[in-house]
Image: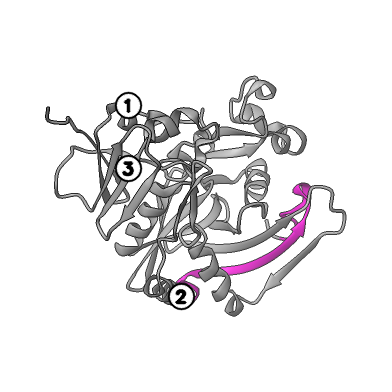
C-alpha cells in the first residue's frame, strides 16, 4: 500500500517553508502555528505572523517529518531540506514542556527559519522593542535569557510606549538604509512580574484569571496586540539601545551611558544568540548547532554595518530593579 503524505506551507518575512509528513496530526497541530496567546510553545511568541500559503515545490526550504512508531528521533539537515524521523507523534503527546520540540518556540524550526532569513539579508536580534510616538524613537532592549528584557518592555509599556517586539526583532540593511520589521506581540511573561511589579498592565492586556493560568505556573502567554505600534516596519528610525541586568530587590541603581563605538561585539553576540547554540529536543535528543564560520563572519560584518549606519541616539548599560530600570532613559 502506498503511504499517504500531507502538506502544509507558511511564509515568514518572505521565506517560504514547505512541511511534509506521513501523519496529518503533526501538521495540524495549530498550538504551534496559529495559536494567539494560550500556549507557551507557540511560534507566535517568536514571529509576528506565519502566513499560510499554498504548497508548491518551489519553496525556499522543506521540512520532512516522518513518523515511525517506536523509533528514536533522527535529524538530517541539508542546505534546503531537513529530515526528521522517529516516533514524533509519541514525543509530542508525552512531552509536557513543548517549547523545546521541533516546532516549539525554543526548538529547531525557529533556528532554521532564522538562518534562512539571514540568507535573504534579514537578521534577527534577541530583543524586546518598544516605540515612543512622542519622541519618535525605537528602543531595542538586547540581552540573553534572564537578563530582564521583558521587564524593561513592561516598564516601558506602563509609561505609554508601544510594543514592537517581545522576543525577536528583525532588520535589513539596504544600501544606506536600515529597515526594522515588527517581531512577535505575544510574550511569555513571568506571572510574578505582572502581579507584583506591573499590576496596572493586567487590565490593559485583558488578562482574566491570571492566578489560575497554568504553565508550570511560572509563566503565562500575554497577547499585547492592543498596545502594539501601528507601523509594522520602521525605516531608518532613531534608536536607543538598552543592555539590561534586572534584579528584583536591587536598591542601588547603576545606569551608565555607553560609548556607541564599543557596542559592536555586543551586537554580534546578540545576533548569534538564537541560532548558534545546539538544541536538545524533547529534553532528550541532541541536535548540533546550525551555525558555521562563514555565517558568523558575515554576522560580524553586519554588526559593524549596523553600528555605522543605524541612527543610534544612545546606548545604555542598566543594573536596576523593575521599578527604576528606565530612569535617565525616557
Q: Residues within 10 Å of mark 2 (few under 14, many from 20)?
A: some
Q: To which residue does mark 3 refer? A: 85
Give the alpha-carbon distance from disc 3 to disc 2, as whole Å: 34 Å
Rendering quarter of residue 135: bottom right
In reply to whether residue 310 is colored magenta, the answer given is yes
User: Looking at the picture, does residue 187 appear above or below residue 138?
Assistant: above
**Colour scheme of the rendered structure:** one colour
The disc, 3 or 1, on the residue closer to the chain's N-terminal end is 1
- Answer left or right for 219 relative to 227: right
Side of 89 where 258 appears, left or right = right
In the structure shown, which secondary structural element does the residue marked by tag 3 occupy? strand
Gap between marks 1 and 2 measured at Cα: 41 Å
Secondary-structure class at tag 2: helix
Q: Is residue 91 visible?
A: yes
Question: What is the span of residues highlighted in magenta in the rendered image?
Answer: 303-328
109 left or right, relative to 142: left
| Residue at the disc numbered 2 | 300
Amino acid at each position: 500500500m502506498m503511504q499517504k503524505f500531507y502538506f502544509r506551507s507558511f511564509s515568514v518575512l518572505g521565506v517560504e517553508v514547505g512541511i511534509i509528513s506521513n501523519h496529518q496530526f503533526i501538521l495540524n497541530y495549530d498550538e504551534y502555528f496559529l495559536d494567539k496567546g494560550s500556549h507557551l510553545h507557540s511560534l507566535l511568541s517568536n514571529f509576528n505572523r506565519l502566513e499560510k500559503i499554498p504548497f508548491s515545490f518551489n519553496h525556499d526550504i522543506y521540512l520532512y517529518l516522518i513518523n515511525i512508531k517506536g523509533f528514536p528521533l533522527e535529524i538530517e539537515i541539508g542546505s534546503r531540506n531537513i529530515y526528521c524521523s522517529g516516533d514524533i507523534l509519541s514525543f509530542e503527546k508525552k512531552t509536557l514542556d513543548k517549547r523545546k520540540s521541533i516546532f516549539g518556540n525554543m526548538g529547531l524550526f525557529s533556528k532554521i527559519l532564522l538562518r534562512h532569513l539571514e540568507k535573504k539579508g534579514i537578521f534577527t536580534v534577541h530583543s524586546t522593542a518598544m516605540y515612543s510616538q512622542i519622541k519618535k524613537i525605537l528602543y531595542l532592549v538586547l540581552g540573553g535569557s534572564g537578563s530582564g528584557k521583558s521587564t524593561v518592555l513592561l516598564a516601558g509599556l506602563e509609561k505609554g510606549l508601544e510594543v514592537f517586539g517581545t522576543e525577536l526583532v528583525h532588520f535589513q540593511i539596504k544600501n544606506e538604509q536600515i529597515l526594522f520589521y515588527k517581531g512577535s506581540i505575544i510574550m511569555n511573561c513571568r506571572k510574578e512580574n505582572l502581579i507584583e511589579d506591573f499590576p496596572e498592565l493586567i487590565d490593559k492586556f485583558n488578562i482574566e484569571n491570571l492566578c489560575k493560568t497554568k504553565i508550570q505556573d511560572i509563566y503565562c502567554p500575554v497577547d499585547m496586540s492592543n498596545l502594539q505600534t501601528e507601523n509594522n516596519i520602521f525605516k531608518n528610525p532613531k534608536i536607543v539601545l538598552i543592555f539590561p541586568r534586572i534584579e528584583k530587590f536591587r536598591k542601588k541603581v547603576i545606569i551608565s551611558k555607553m560609548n556607541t563605538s564599543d557596542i559592536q561585539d555586543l551586537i554580534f553576540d546578540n545576533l548569534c544568540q538564537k541560532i548558534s547554540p545546539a538544541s536538545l529536543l524533547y529534553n532528550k535528543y541532541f541536535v548540533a548547532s546550525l551555525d558555521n564560520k562563514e555565517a558568523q563572519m558575515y554576522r560580524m560584518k553586519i554588526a559593524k554595518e549596523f553600528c555605522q549606519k543605524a541612527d543610534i541616539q544612545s546606548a545604555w548599560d542598566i543594573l536596576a530593579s523593575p521599578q527604576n530600570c528606565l530612569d535617565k532613559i525616557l
